[in-house]
Image (tube, rainbow, N blue to C red):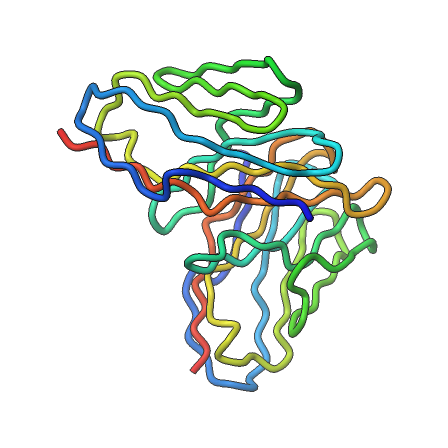
Amino acid sequence: EDQVTQSPEALRLQEGESSSLNCSYTVSGLRGLFWYRQDPGKGPEFLFTLYSAGEEKEKERLKATLTKKESFLHITAPKPEDSATYLCAVQALIIQGAQKLVFGQGTRLTINP
Amino acid sequence: EAQVTQNPRYLITVTGKKLTVTCSQNMNHEYMSWYRQDPGLGLRQIYYSMNVEVTDKGDVPEGYKVSRKEKRNFPLILESPSPNQTSLYFCASSFESWGTEAFFGQGTRLTVV
């Protein structure tokens, strides 16, 4: 069964304190791993897509990496505005030509000033 | 502005009263889907559509219907809502079925009493 597990569930950091969020997955035939950011009361907002092990993507203070079994979202010197829930999702095959996103539970990140 | 628009944003209804949540995207995307988000369960796919007149069930389709008569619109229909359908609903669209990020609407918070 396709599964995505994120850890920790919640993380509280001080401004400037770097850390990493983890996303481990089991899926038959990974076609893409996505990171989204979700603010309270809003829809998920796309951050990154990773397609193959060893790939890395960066955006401002965020860097996503991918191995064969997990992905990390590294946050360097975070600011309070980085506070949000970060969602990881993998594309899983339903039937030929059709896919679905399987989401993890998310990591709720709080950055204290 | 590229966006996915859902309406209404908030809805309180009574058990058994049919309702429709509309979803429209202005990006000419082929693929659209509906998710519900519940605490502890994350985002789960309800229905998806690969193109006009092509729809299929996701993980939690019971009690829901959809239609895709036009490329831009993908309404979610609850014929006889029940309290266990109280949830936060998101519509999403993407250019293709595979490998492209999904754009999410702002969400519809539905309460069934």
Q: Position of residue B50 (x, y in %)?
A: 78, 46
x and y, in percent, of residue A90 in the image:
62, 36
Image coordinates for residue B96, horizontal then vertical, percent: 73, 34
From the viewer's perspective, is B79 left or right of B87?
right
Q: Is residue B39 left or right of residue A25?
A: left
Q: Residue at x 47, y 65 (%)?
A: B87
Which residue is at 54% across, 58% downward?
B36
Q: Nearer the viewer, residue B103 or A92?
A: A92
Q: Is residue B101 shown above or below B67?
A: above
Q: Which image quarter holds the C terminus of chain B?
A: bottom left
Residue that extends furthest to the right in the rendered view of this protein: A96
Residue displayed at 86% across by 42% down: A96
Using residue B67 as the reference point, say whether residue B23 is left or right of it.
left
Q: Is residue A95 above or below residue B98?
A: below
For the point 67% across and 58% down, the residue is: B59
Q: Nearer the viewer, residue B87 or A5?
A: A5
Whether A63 is drawn above or below B102: the answer is above
Count how many numbered circles sit on residues in the image.
0
Residue lying farthest left? Answer: A113
Q: Quadrant of residue A29?
A: top right
Residue B101, above or below A67: below
Quarter location, residue A15: top left
Q: Quadrant of residue B111?
A: bottom left
Please state which of residues A17 and B34 is positioned toward the viewer in this rendering. A17
Q: Position of residue A69 (x, y in %)?
A: 60, 28
